[in-house]
Amino acid sequence: MEKEYMDKIDKEWSNKRKVSKSRWWMVPSILRHVNEIVCGEPLEGVSSGLNYKLKKLGFKFEHGVSVGFGNGSKEFKLMEEGIVNKFTLFELSEERIKIASDNADLQGLSDRVEFIKGDYYIHKFDEDVDFVHWNNSLHHMINVEKAIKWSFEILINGGVFYMDDFVGPSKFQWADAQLQLATRIRQTLPDIYLKNRRKPGKMLDRTISQPNAQDIEKADPSEAADSSAILDNIKKYFPNADINLTGGCVYHTALNDILCNIDESDEKDKTILDLLLIIDELATKSGVETQYATVLAIKNDNILKLISRKIRGL
Ligand SMILES: C[S@@+](CC[C@H](N)C(=O)[O-])C[C@H]1O[C@@H](n2cnc3c(N)ncnc32)[C@H](O)[C@@H]1O
């Protein structure tokens, strides 16, 4: 990886602004919906469905590896739940390493985590790796095949690949069916939901159009760099992976910036959101490309796919 590239990602992610409650992963009803698709239970919290499956399967890992860990909260949760004993963690953002390191101290986990600022790909591990964790970071890898192949190679036989990530079109270049569905949703919603909270007095667009790929590249060259290649490469290196498509065309694209206008404690708003989530799920099942997915796979083993279907009651 070139130094110039690594410095740019460091700058972008060390100065990342906080987003308001307009993103789907901040909305409890959507998290419950996603978790239910993944594990059959409408659990609270980010990635809880996937973690529940790991627990149900009785997995315990000695040494996990995670790339692009942000503030480390997802990895620390797995440690606190007794699923992973220690982690080697890779990041490019100096600021995020500092935050994660402070969090690890506070949670008494410091002696079981190693932080590495730099290129994960060239690192030589002294100890076996039995767990590779990607959470909303695989879609930031410039070459997804290289990252998944690396994950496969560093794992011991029987080790587990875990992913909860954006797997939609690279650089958010939505397919026609996605643009059409998201636009139809926006055109149907009453004005009150289209209020633009960032620009008071203005309305959000009722038409969803393709974002400019060059603008995205300029702001953050790692953003959805090669995301459309994720699922095919997972199937290539982990042919028996348990993959759950968790959708997103409605809750991520159509409702982007609209979610802060939906009050989950209001019965009418909650009903509208629930109906929109049903549309999202059915759209994915009927072939509208998913934007998010979860994956669990055991290196060189196919038992997991079979058991996971049982957990979901299929
Ligand atoms: C969307 S954030 C996800 C953070 C965290 N995994 C989470 O789910 O909250 C993506 C993170 O990947 C990091 N990143 C991007 N490219 C990277 C690379 N090549 N190696 C390590 N980290 C990288 C960024 O600095 C950023 O913190």
Image (tube, helix red, strand yellow):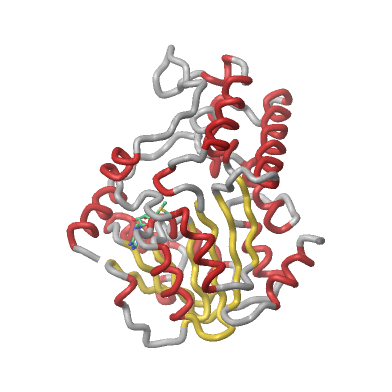
Q: Within the displayed image, which quadrant is ligand 1 positioned in?
A: bottom left
Question: Which one is in front, 15 or 298?
Answer: 298
Question: Which one is in front, 33 or 95?
Answer: 33
Question: Which one is in front, 119 or 145?
Answer: 145
User: Hey, which quadrant is residue 138 in on the image?
Assistant: bottom left
Q: Residue at x 63, y 57 (%)?
A: 48
Q: Position of residue 139 (x, y in %)?
A: 43, 55
Q: Residue at x 55, y 27 (%)?
A: 183
Q: How many marks?
A: 0
Q: Position of residue 90 (x, y in %)?
A: 36, 67
Question: Which one is in front, 205 or 287?
Answer: 287
Of all residues shown, which one is farthest toward the top? 201
Above or below, 70 against 126 in this view is above
Quadrant of the image containing the N terminus: bottom left
Q: Position of residue 267 (x, y in %)?
A: 73, 26
Of all residues shown, which one is farthest toward the right? 313
Above or below, 216 against 255 in this view is below
Q: Position of residue 153 (x, y in %)?
A: 45, 80
Quadrant of the image containing the C terminus: bottom right
Q: Residue at x 23, y 57 (%)?
A: 5
298 sits to left or right of 304: left
Above or below, 182 against 235 in this view is above
Of all residues shown, which one is farthest toward the left? 4
Above or below, 82 against 176 in this view is below
27 sits to left or right of 198: right
User: Hey, which quadrant is residue 288 in on the image?
Assistant: top right
